[in-house]
Image: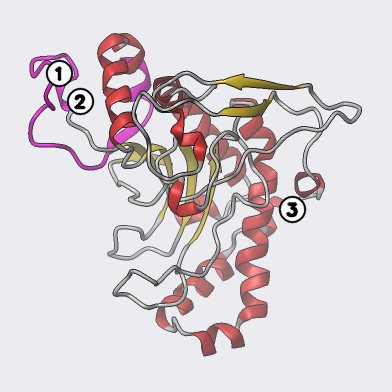
Amino acid sequence: MQAAAKTPSCCARGGIPPRGVTGTPGSVAVRTVRLSSPCTPFLAGSGALAGSQRTAPVITLAGTPASVSPFLQQPARLADRMFTQATFDFLQDLRDHNDKSWFDANKARYETVAKGPLSDFVRAMGPAIRSISGHYLADDRSAFRIHRDTRFSKDKSPYKTHLAAQFRHEAVRGPLSETVHAPGFYCHISPEGLGEMDGCFGGFGTWRPEGPALAAIRARIVSHPDDWAAARDTVSLGGESLKRVPAGFDAEHRFADDLRRKDYIGSITFEPAEVMGASFVDRFADACRKAAPLNRFLCNAVGLPW
């Protein structure tokens, strides 16, 4: 495993609606809070962040649950039966035959060597994610669908040629297209190739936050420079940047280069052998723990509880 400047352009594409915790024995109490940050429209499910005059929504937040969803209660298969060479072979074959007729003929293979192992991985990651932050979830909505949304794309290939899972904040609600900007933990598994999204990596942080969120992150960098210094060094940051420091910020600031960023994304790459190893869950969990200070900083900036 090594840090890399590879920038996963869609590593935050996903959305998990908030999940309440019932008052059953062993569960934690539910508390209702009102978030006052100008960026709490993250929680509204509108997809666009409103300005500071928007009333912060009331949301229900649960603490670290003592009881977990039925999905997580199902035992994961043995670690050495998760991602295997058969997983990568299937994805490579799908890359070569990306059409419905081929996929339909190989659907049982997909279920066995791709979808099933991805579900097992998400389930196995549950305890680690909850130990990092009680506000982050690993559940049956964490795994991305294999089908592509081709409505607005020139590429009409019906299927993704990678597997992916996103562990998102419980307070972020809405469909995938509307929660792309929230800080998260992302896992991407793909055969090697020349494309931007080829290979295996973990992505952490926030991709293309909208105006108010971006301004809040930059403001927190200025007001908490030491915290930012500690957070930014946990992963290799990538993404796009402006040519100049935006108006209202000091062009000579200690972190002027970071104030120019459009994305606050870090990534860590994995070799296929690591992904296929019995210890991959532990490796990825360690990467999430390493990147946690970045997501904590970003959550604090945009008003999401950590």
- Residue 78: numbered disc: 3
Residue picked out by circle 1: 249
The magenta-colored residue range is 229-258
Q: Between residue 220 and residue 86, name the one nearer to us.
A: 220
Rendered residue at 83%/27% (across/down): 27
Residue 168, quarter of the rendered image:
top right
Crowdedness near tag 1: few (<14), some (14–19) or many (≥20) residues, C-alpha within 10 Å: some
- Amino acid type at circle 2 is Leu
Q: Is residue 243 magenta?
A: yes
- Amino acid type at circle 1 is Phe
Asked if 135 appears above or below 271 in the picture, the reply is above
Residue picked out by circle 2: 259
Q: Position of residue 193 (x, y in %)?
A: 33, 65
Q: Position of residue 181 (x, y in %)?
A: 40, 41
- Residue 277: numbered disc: none
Separation (CA) of disc 1 from disc 2:
8 Å
Crowdedness near tag 3: few (<14), some (14–19) or many (≥20) residues, C-alpha within 10 Å: few
What coloring was used for the rendering?
secondary structure
